[in-house]
Amino acid sequence: AYQSLVEMSWSSFFFYVVVYYVSVNLLFGFGFVLIGVDKLSGVTPSYFWDDLSAAFFFSIQTFTTVGYGAVNPQGIVAHMLASADALVGLISTALATGLFFARFSKAKAQLIFSNDALISPYRGTEQMSFQFRIANLRESRVINLRASVILSWVETTSTGFSTRRFYNLPLERDEVNLLPLNWTVVHLIDKESPIKGWEPRDFTQNQAEVIIFIEGYDESFGQKIHVSSSYTCREIRWNAQFLPMYYPRNGKTVLDLDAIHEFEFLEEN
């Protein structure tokens, strides 16, 4: 429950807080109605819904320790129920405060990945490479960024037994000290690469997937961040190259985050 409340969106979090707040006070409101609203000084017994309304709002005053003083419990049973209401309110406030702090203080990276990965010529040479791009959506400084890329595919043995294999793809550069613009992560498809000689149909037949793990340090939060993504055969474009996503303007370099996904296919020789 704690993990779900910390990970969910803010709108969902506030929805559950409001539902809990109303439900608990309705429950105590029913309790006061059951013992009789005549046990609450300042409340005149009337119809059920009027009694429930008065008991509900008295519960809210007790739950939040507001206590306007217009209504007071009378008798041991009413005092015990009001005491339980106040205790639940104190515990709930402490839990809600802790959850708010955990959500605000949690370092959540806003690193975006290009929609597609490319099989592209490496720096204009005939050697091919596997490439994808990442960039930081926030203005926070992310340092000591490290990338790990793993190729996963299904391999069938000579006996007909299928097993999924994993291979850590070496990168041209697996770490950068600072991410000021974008980072194009590159794996050279040399003779040591497991995808050397693969064609698009090989990725499909082998049910291949490239899994990416990114970790770094966010200076704004003072915490480590972890981000993961993957590319399947449907998200890999062959013989293409990324288009530039930054340009100079008035002596400054402007990063166009919308262009992180843009690429162009190269003409066949």
Image (cartoon, rainbow, N blue to C red):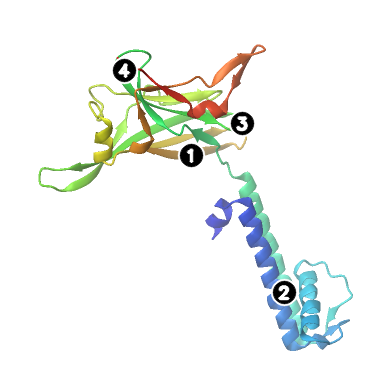
**Quarter where residue 239 is shown:** top left
Contact? badges 4 and 2 (CB < 8 Å): no
Kindly indicate whether the residue at mark 3 contacts the one at mark 1 (C-beta within 8 angstroms).
no
Q: Earlier in the sequence, mark 1 or mark 3?
A: 3
Q: Is residue 194 above or below residue 24?
A: above
Q: Tell me the amino acid under the disc marked 1.
A: His
Specify few, some or many for label 2: CA neighbours under 10 Å numbering under 14, 14-19, or 20 or more.
many
Say whether marks 1 and 4 touch (CB < 8 Å). no
Question: Residue 140 bears which disc, if any?
Answer: 3
In three-dimensional space, the C-alpha distance between marks 2 and 3, rounded to whole angstroms, equals 43 Å
Q: Earlier in the sequence, mark 1 or mark 4?
A: 1
Q: Which mark is residue 180?
A: none
Q: Tag 1: Cα neighbours inside 10 Å, few (<14), some, or many (≥20)?
A: some
Circle 3 SS class: loop
- Give the crowd class for mark 4: few <14, some 14-19, many >=20 residues within 10 Å: few
Query: Up-down: is 236 above or below 246?
Result: below
The spot of residue 109 in percent (x, y) is: 55, 38
| Residue 211 vs residue 91, the one in the foreground | 211
N-terminal of the two: label 4 or label 2?
2
User: Is 227 left or right of 155, judged from the image as shown?
Assistant: right
Nearest to N terminus: mark 2 or mark 3:
2
Tag shown at residue 226: 1
User: Which residue is disc 2 drawn over?
Assistant: 85
Mark closest to the chain's N terminus, 4 or 3: 3
| Residue at which label 4 appears | 268
Q: Where residue 79 sits in the image (x, y, percent)?
A: 77, 81
Please tell me in which quadrant of the rendered image residue 219 appears. top right
In this rendering, the label closer to the viewer, 2 or 3? 3
Q: Secondary structure at mark 4?
A: loop
Q: Position of residue 168 (x, y in %)?
A: 31, 33
Q: Which numbered mark, 4 or 3, is in the foreground of this view?
A: 4
* C-alpha gap between disc 4 and disc 3: 41 Å
